[in-house]
Amino acid sequence: MKLKDLVGLHDLSDVDVATEMYGGNVVNVVRFVLDGKTYKAIEDPDDGYRSYLTNLEVTDEKVTNNFPSHKVVGTMKGAGWYEHDIILFIDIVTGKVVLEVGTEDVSDYYPCCVLGWHPENLAINIGR
Protein backbone atom coordinates (compact mmCIF):
# COMPACT_ATOMS: atom_id res chain seq x y z
CA MET A 1 0.00 0.00 0.00
CA LYS A 2 1.22 3.51 -0.79
CA LEU A 3 0.81 6.56 1.45
CA LYS A 4 -0.82 8.52 -1.37
CA ASP A 5 -3.66 5.96 -1.31
CA LEU A 6 -4.78 7.63 1.96
CA VAL A 7 -5.03 11.17 0.56
CA GLY A 8 -8.49 12.68 1.13
CA LEU A 9 -11.15 13.11 3.82
CA HIS A 10 -11.31 10.45 6.55
CA ASP A 11 -12.61 9.69 10.04
CA LEU A 12 -9.65 9.13 12.38
CA SER A 13 -10.67 7.36 15.57
CA ASP A 14 -7.74 5.54 17.21
CA VAL A 15 -3.94 5.84 17.30
CA ASP A 16 -1.26 3.78 19.08
CA VAL A 17 2.47 4.47 19.07
CA ALA A 18 4.66 1.55 20.16
CA THR A 19 7.88 -0.38 19.71
CA GLU A 20 7.93 -4.04 18.78
CA MET A 21 10.12 -6.71 17.21
CA TYR A 22 10.12 -6.75 13.42
CA GLY A 23 12.69 -8.44 11.20
CA GLY A 24 14.97 -9.11 14.18
CA ASN A 25 15.03 -5.45 15.28
CA VAL A 26 13.11 -3.38 17.80
CA VAL A 27 11.27 -0.83 15.65
CA ASN A 28 8.78 1.99 16.06
CA VAL A 29 5.26 1.39 14.81
CA VAL A 30 2.07 3.41 14.63
CA ARG A 31 -1.36 1.81 14.35
CA PHE A 32 -4.25 4.07 13.38
CA VAL A 33 -7.87 3.68 12.34
CA LEU A 34 -9.25 5.52 9.32
CA ASP A 35 -12.87 5.01 8.33
CA GLY A 36 -13.06 1.89 10.52
CA LYS A 37 -10.00 0.22 8.91
CA THR A 38 -6.81 -0.30 10.95
CA TYR A 39 -3.44 0.53 9.39
CA LYS A 40 0.04 -0.20 10.71
CA ALA A 41 3.08 1.88 9.75
CA ILE A 42 6.44 0.20 10.47
CA GLU A 43 9.88 1.79 10.70
CA ASP A 44 13.01 0.26 9.14
CA PRO A 45 15.89 1.45 11.37
CA ASP A 46 18.38 0.59 8.57
CA ASP A 47 21.90 1.22 9.89
CA GLY A 48 21.21 3.41 12.93
CA TYR A 49 21.92 6.63 11.03
CA ARG A 50 19.21 6.28 8.40
CA SER A 51 15.66 5.07 8.76
CA TYR A 52 12.68 4.61 6.47
CA LEU A 53 9.01 3.81 6.58
CA THR A 54 9.39 0.18 5.56
CA ASN A 55 5.77 -0.86 5.40
CA LEU A 56 2.21 0.42 5.56
CA GLU A 57 -0.30 -2.37 5.86
CA VAL A 58 -3.89 -3.09 6.80
CA THR A 59 -4.03 -5.10 10.02
CA ASP A 60 -6.49 -6.77 12.38
CA GLU A 61 -4.43 -5.74 15.42
CA LYS A 62 -6.28 -3.90 18.18
CA VAL A 63 -5.61 -0.23 18.84
CA THR A 64 -5.86 0.55 22.56
CA ASN A 65 -5.80 4.37 22.47
CA ASN A 66 -9.41 5.04 21.45
CA PHE A 67 -11.17 8.40 21.05
CA PRO A 68 -14.25 9.71 19.24
CA SER A 69 -13.70 9.96 15.51
CA HIS A 70 -12.46 13.22 14.04
CA LYS A 71 -12.62 14.37 10.44
CA VAL A 72 -9.12 14.67 9.05
CA VAL A 73 -7.74 15.39 5.60
CA GLY A 74 -4.81 13.34 4.39
CA THR A 75 -2.38 15.30 2.24
CA MET A 76 1.14 14.57 1.03
CA LYS A 77 3.84 16.81 2.50
CA GLY A 78 5.49 19.06 -0.06
CA ALA A 79 9.18 18.99 -0.86
CA GLY A 80 11.70 21.10 1.06
CA TRP A 81 15.43 20.86 0.53
CA TYR A 82 14.83 17.20 -0.27
CA GLU A 83 11.92 15.09 -1.43
CA HIS A 84 9.57 13.67 1.23
CA ASP A 85 7.23 10.68 1.19
CA ILE A 86 5.07 11.71 4.14
CA ILE A 87 1.32 11.89 4.56
CA LEU A 88 -0.05 14.47 6.96
CA PHE A 89 -3.48 14.01 8.55
CA ILE A 90 -4.87 17.42 9.42
CA ASP A 91 -7.84 17.96 11.77
CA ILE A 92 -10.42 19.91 9.76
CA VAL A 93 -11.50 21.94 12.82
CA THR A 94 -8.09 22.98 14.16
CA GLY A 95 -6.25 22.95 10.82
CA LYS A 96 -3.30 21.32 12.60
CA VAL A 97 -1.40 18.10 11.87
CA VAL A 98 -2.51 15.29 14.19
CA LEU A 99 -0.68 12.37 12.56
CA GLU A 100 2.27 12.20 10.15
CA VAL A 101 3.65 9.01 8.64
CA GLY A 102 6.42 8.39 6.11
CA THR A 103 10.04 9.14 5.28
CA GLU A 104 11.54 12.63 5.14
CA ASP A 105 14.50 13.56 2.98
CA VAL A 106 14.18 10.40 0.88
CA SER A 107 16.75 11.64 -1.65
CA ASP A 108 19.26 12.73 1.03
CA TYR A 109 22.15 10.68 2.41
CA TYR A 110 20.31 10.55 5.78
CA PRO A 111 16.60 9.86 5.25
CA CYS A 112 14.52 9.60 8.41
CA CYS A 113 11.32 7.72 9.26
CA VAL A 114 8.56 9.96 10.60
CA LEU A 115 5.84 8.52 12.84
CA GLY A 116 4.43 11.60 14.54
CA TRP A 117 1.31 11.61 16.71
CA HIS A 118 0.11 15.00 17.96
CA PRO A 119 -3.09 14.43 20.00
CA GLU A 120 -2.94 17.98 21.35
CA ASN A 121 -3.97 19.14 17.83
CA LEU A 122 -7.27 17.23 17.83
CA ALA A 123 -10.38 19.38 18.10
CA ILE A 124 -11.55 17.35 21.11
CA ASN A 125 -8.44 18.54 23.01
CA ILE A 126 -8.92 22.28 22.45
CA GLY A 127 -8.63 24.02 25.81
CA ARG A 128 -7.38 20.94 27.68
Image (tube, rainbow, N blue to C red):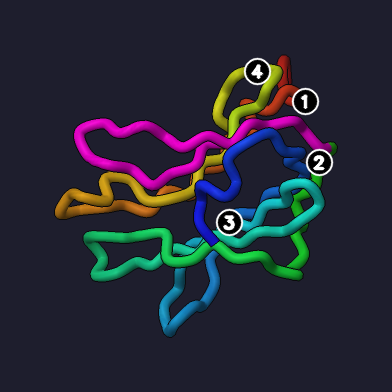
Disc 2 + disc 1, Cβ < 8 Å: yes
- Crowding at mark 3 (Cα within 10 Å: few <14, some 14-19, many 20+): many
Location of residue 97 in the rendering, given as x and y in whole percent from the top left corner: 55, 29
Residue visible at 69% across and 68% down in the picture: 59
- Residue that label 1 marks: 124
Query: Residue 105, relative to residue 80: is it above or below?
Result: below
Local SS, label 1: helix
In primary-sequence order, the first of circles 3 and 1 is 3
Magenta residues, start to end: 69-88
State yes or no: residue 13 in magenta.
Answer: no
- Residue that label 3 marks: 30
Image quadrant occupied by the C terminus: top right
Q: Give the numbered dot on residue 67.
A: 2
Q: Nearer the viewer, mark 2 or mark 4?
A: 4
Location of residue 122 in the rendering, given as x and y in whole percent from the top left corner: 68, 28
- Crowding at mark 2 (Cα within 10 Å: few <14, some 14-19, many 20+): few
Measured in 3D between alpha carbons, the distance from the residue under mark 2 to the one under mark 4, in whole angstroms, is 16 Å
**Amino acid of disc 3:** Val
**Amino acid of disc 2:** Phe
117, 40: nearer the viewer: 40
- Residue that label 4 marks: 94
View extreme (bottom): residue? 24
Query: Which of the 4 quarters of the picture holds residue 69?
Result: top right
**Amino acid of disc 4:** Thr
Q: Main secondary structure of the magenta part?
A: strand
In primary-sequence order, the first of circles 2 and 4 is 2
Local SS, label 4: loop
Query: Residue 53, relative to residue 22: is it above or below?
Result: above
In primary-sequence order, the first of circles 2 and 1 is 2
In the image, taking residue 21 as reference, residue 72 lies left or right, namely right
In primary-sequence order, the first of circles 4 and 1 is 4
In primary-sequence order, the first of circles 4 and 3 is 3
